[in-house]
Amino acid sequence: MGADSLLDIQNLKLDLPDGRRLLEGVSFQVQAGEALGVVGESGSGKSLTAMSVMGLLPGLYASGQIVFAGQNLVGLPDKSMRKLRGARIAMIFQDPMTAFLPVRSIGAQIDEQIRLHQPRSRREARARTVQLLGRMGVPDPAMAAKRYPHQLSGGLRQRAMIAMALSCSPDLLIADEPTTALDVTVQAQILTLLREIRDEGAGVMLITHDMGVVAQACTHVAVMYSGLVVERGPVRDVLDRPLHPYTQALLAAIPPLEGPRPEQLPTIPGQPPTPENRPSGCVFAPRCGFVRPDCGVRPALIETEEGRRVACVLYAV
Amino acid sequence: MNVLLEARRLEKQYKLGGGRVLHAVSDVSLQVHRGEALALVGESGCGKSSLGRTLIGLTQPTSGEVLFDGHRISGLSDHALRPWRARMQMVFQDSSAAFNPRRTVGESLAEPLRIHGRKNIRARVDDLLDQVGLARSVADRYPHEFSGGQRQRLNIARALVLGPDLLVADEPVSALDVSVQAQIVNLFRDLRASLGVACVFISHDLSVVRQMADRIAVMYLGSIVEEGDGLEVLDRPAHPYTKALLDAVPRPDRPLPPPLKGDVPSPVNPPSGCRFHTRCPIAQPKCATDRPSLQPCGVGRRVACHYPLVA
Ligand SMILES: Nc1ncnc2c1ncn2[C@@H]1O[C@H](COP(=O)(O)OP(=O)(O)OP(=O)(O)O)[C@@H](O)[C@H]1O
Ligand SMILES: Nc1ncnc2c1ncn2[C@@H]1O[C@H](COP(=O)(O)OP(=O)(O)OP(=O)(O)O)[C@@H](O)[C@H]1O
Ligand code: SF4
Ligand SMILES: [Mg+2]
Ligand SMILES: [Mg+2]
């Protein structure tokens, strides 16, 4: 495990200057050609994990390891990090407006991104921009490149942002809720795109709240709760047979789109802990229906079967 | 009379610059029965919020009328509308905007009661908090002290203060985490059962809508294209657009089918004939010229399509 991973995060911890711990020890891998879905409670640290990989968390103290293509990114000087960002690791966000400046055409901004990392003439860069936009299914890409961000529909803007992220053929694409604000029909187009990117050999880390999106676009999934990965494994296994009680509760809370309609949806009692009152044992214990005395000691993320891990005493050997 | 709210041939247009007109709601007729939950679904910009606001008089229709409890409420002045306002309330997407940040939530909840000269105000506030599943003690706290889910419970409590017959809830759970969302979905079910309040839910999430609504109206470019019993519409869609929406929902058990072609056309310049014909996978020449009207299709169901998928 790990040696030839594209991205290998081991025991990543993230602390605020005042000592509050936001990430409690996150571990997972992303292989080339695979997509890891990262799901879990709002505030569980999904975006923080992504931003750590991007090296975009000024003021927070990281420890542990983020090994990307053999190189540990934790503590890497800003200058080296900038070389990786955009070129080998790219990121897309929920709101494409954050990726584009409002005052310049999207084409000009993608051209610039290309020329920042590759020696190309303006003409060559624009040709590549138009080609990329076309690949994203943007109709009349040469025209679209001349448009300003606000002149495009949400779906087109999202595709333009993905085009920009892919402009330097990154090895790793990080997507933080890239389809949350989109309609299902547009989302379907973006998910198809992500699948193609993966087929071409890039690794993808996809943060989402939507289990259907995970099922469609990902090969593996990591479930986070309160700054920790509590379960991870191949998508099919985790969705069909969730092990961790939190994963089980999360899946049960989704209203079904088919079959009988339940009277009540199963819910999780209580609220997730804040960093200040995070339990020293299992972080899910205060809300867990299976809690027992040995949950008072933090369970490790142990392998239960080939490729699957869970942090819960119910599966301790 | 069983019909609580009725819309007849509603149009809502927005005037844009340069003489252009945006058709946000176009020829919508519908009914909401007492105690019933109707969901409005459809893609961004199809006119759900505009319709919802028009239904309860927050905005005036360009033409057509709205009847509440048999009385015409569209076209009324603000003053004439006031007595009706207490009976129709709106719940918005999770927001603390509805509460004054400098007042305790108890004070905010009490205010409309005081304005309407109600008695036993403290007891009523306690009741409301019980109904939405919050401890009575939270009345002394301030809005910023609440989580997203708790805030949405407060928003619902605020909408219930005056004992309305109808709630219009615009994306009431879309900003919430899956597990919190489930709590609020359940809460709406409980409230409908205990208070008999009718609801119009606006949402773009089909599985949420299936759980919350008795009836569903699917909108496309300002018009209802299909309407009927919630489970039936979603389990056996009659309109090609409803089917396309369902197909596009990512699910564990099957690969995504090819997406709909093209983008949603502009509501400033909607297509001729059936407004969906530019993207419809089964369109025929007739669809580009003749606009299909909402016609009965099975029991309690209407569909606007020349070639419905179920008879
Ligand atoms: N710069 C910061 N300073 C202090 N706390 C922070 C900072 N950034 C994030 N946090 C806190 O860290 C926790 C994890 O945040 P993060 O944004 O990673 O959550 P998330 O899993 O992405 O949630 P969501 O699903 O809501 O996007 C949250 O409780 C958040 O309030
Ligand atoms: N005050 C307004 N002035 C001009 N156009 C408006 C106004 N309000 C809404 N629109 C337009 O009317 C159409 C319908 O908007 P509406 O907000 O009702 O849609 P919606 O279905 O609620 O969308 P969403 O799912 O994004 O909330 C859109 O094209 C919108 O841009
Ligand atoms: S009327 Fe024609 S274009 Fe419209 S939905 Fe039906 S088949 Fe498609
Ligand atoms: Mg996040
Ligand atoms: Mg809306």
Image (cartoon, coloured by chain):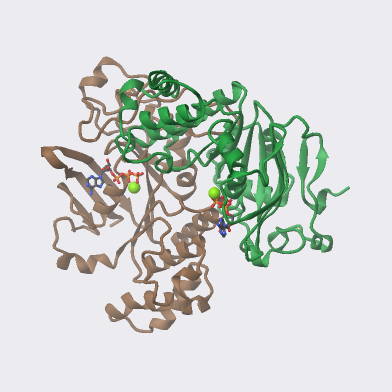
Chain colours: A green, B brown
Q: How many marks?
A: 0
- Spot the residue most to the top: B285
The quarter holding residue B92 reads bottom left
Q: Is residue A175 positioned above or below A170 on the image?
A: below
The quarter holding residue B227 reads top left
Q: Nearer the viewer, residue A279 or B67?
A: A279
- Spot the residue most to the left: B19
Asked if one can make out residue A119 in the rendered structure from this viewpoint, the answer is: yes
- Residue at 17%, 64% (x, y): give it: B78
Q: Is residue A220 left or right of residue B80?
A: right
The quarter holding residue B10 reads top left
How far across and down, in percent of the image, does residue A220 sit? Answer: 67, 35
- Residue at 33%, 41% (x, y): give it: A102
Q: Is residue A89 left or right of residue A190?
A: right
How far across and down, in percent of the image, does residue B240 sit? Answer: 38, 27
Q: Nearer the viewer, residue B102 or A3?
A: A3
How far across and down, in percent of the image, does residue A26 sit? Answer: 70, 48
Asked if one can make out residue B247 in the rendered structure from this viewpoint, the answer is: no
How far across and down, in percent of the image, does residue A155 sit? Answer: 39, 34
Quadrant that contains the N terminus of chain A:
top right
- Spot the residue most to the right: A317
Q: Is residue B26 left or right of residue A107?
A: left
Q: Is residue B199 left or right of residue A273?
A: left
Q: Nearer the viewer, residue B179 or A181?
A: A181
